């Protein structure tokens, strides 16, 4: 609890990370918050922007090779925001299994569907994981989020953040439609993030 509060305080001090609810409202509904990914601060900023009650039930998805290696990053991931680890490189039969287990236990998730950070302010094409999770868990509401200015605050390769004010914009829910093809859903989801830019 203290670790979580400290993380939120530090994140807000460095980058603001205040949430702006534009096309949705904070609600106890189980959700997948999906966003553009430009910085290692993205996870902390989005998580810190959630109201405390939602933050307590929301777990960021994090690459084990970066966040799970011990040290301060591992401590933050495990004791701060309770990361759900994924293995990059498909070393397991179902790479989404840890995410599905978290959803099955009632947690919400923070997901970056591009799969990796990009310096561009608009997201690249989304990978299929968001589609598969939304299709297999129709009770979970996928909500678009746009993170502004973090690509300038802590760009790829940077060790320390430059203090800038970041806004976290929460957009519309994007549920999978009946019989919707994967490509159509992923483009609609990406468009919902771009709309917030």
Image: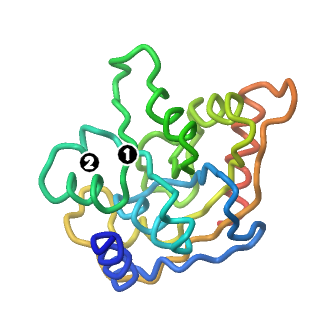
Taking depth in this image into account, of 17 and 150 the one nearest to the observer is 17
- Which label belongs to residue 14? none
**Which residue shows up at 76% across the image and 44% down it?**
188
Q: Quadrant of the N terminus?
A: bottom left
Q: Quadrant of the C terminus?
A: bottom right
Q: Quadrant of residue 175?
A: top right
Q: Quadrant of residue 61?
A: top left
Looking at marks 2 and 1 on the same chain, the residue that comes earlier in the sequence is marked by 1
Taking depth in this image into account, of 8 and 166 the one nearest to the observer is 8
Q: Are marks 2 and 1 in contact (CB under 8 Å)?
A: yes
Which residue is under mark 1? 62
Which residue is under mark 2? 67
Q: Is residue 144 left or right of residue 12?
A: right
Q: Is residue 130 left or right of residue 116?
A: right
Question: Residue 98 at x, y = what percent?
Answer: 44, 32
Q: Residues within 10 Å of mark 2 (few under 14, many from 20)?
A: many
**Which residue shows up at 35% across the image and 77% down it?**
5
**Which residue shows up at 36% across the image and 39% down it?**
85
Q: Is residue 168 left or right of residue 196?
A: left
**Which residue shows up at 71% across the image and 48% down it?**
141
Question: Residue 142 at x, y = what percent?
Answer: 69, 48
In the depicted structure, whether residue 144 falls above or below residue 125: below
Question: Residue 136 at x, y = what percent?
Answer: 68, 28
Q: Mark 1: which secondary structure?
A: strand
CA gap between label 2 and label 1 equals 6 Å
The number of numbered discs placed on residues in the rendered structure image is 2
Q: Residue furthest left?
A: 71
């Amino acid at each position: 609890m203290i670790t979580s509060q400290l993380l939120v305080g530090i994140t807000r001090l460095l980058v603001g990370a205040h949430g702006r609810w534009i096309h949705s409202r904070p609600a106890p509904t189980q959700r997948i918050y999906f966003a553009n990914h430009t910085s290692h601060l993205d996870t902390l900023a989005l998580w810190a922007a959630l109201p405390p009650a939602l933050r307590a039930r929301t777990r960021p998805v994090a690459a084990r090779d970066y966040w799970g290696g011990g040290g301060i990053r591992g401590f933050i991931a495990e004791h701060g925001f309770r990361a759900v680890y994924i293995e990059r490189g498909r070393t397991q039969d179902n790479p989404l299994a840890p995410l599905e287990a978290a959803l099955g236990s009632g947690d919400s998730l923070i997901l970056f569907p591009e799969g990796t950070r990009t310096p561009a302010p608009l997201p690249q094409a989304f990978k299929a994981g968001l589609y598969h999770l939304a299709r297999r868990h129709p009770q979970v509401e996928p909500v678009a989020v746009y993170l502004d200015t973090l690509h300038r605050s802590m760009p790829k390769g940077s060790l320390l953040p430059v203090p800038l004010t970041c806004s976290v914009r929460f957009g519309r829910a994007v549920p999978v439609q009946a019989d919707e093809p994967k490509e159509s859903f992923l483009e609609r989801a990406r468009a919902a993030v771009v709309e917030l830019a």
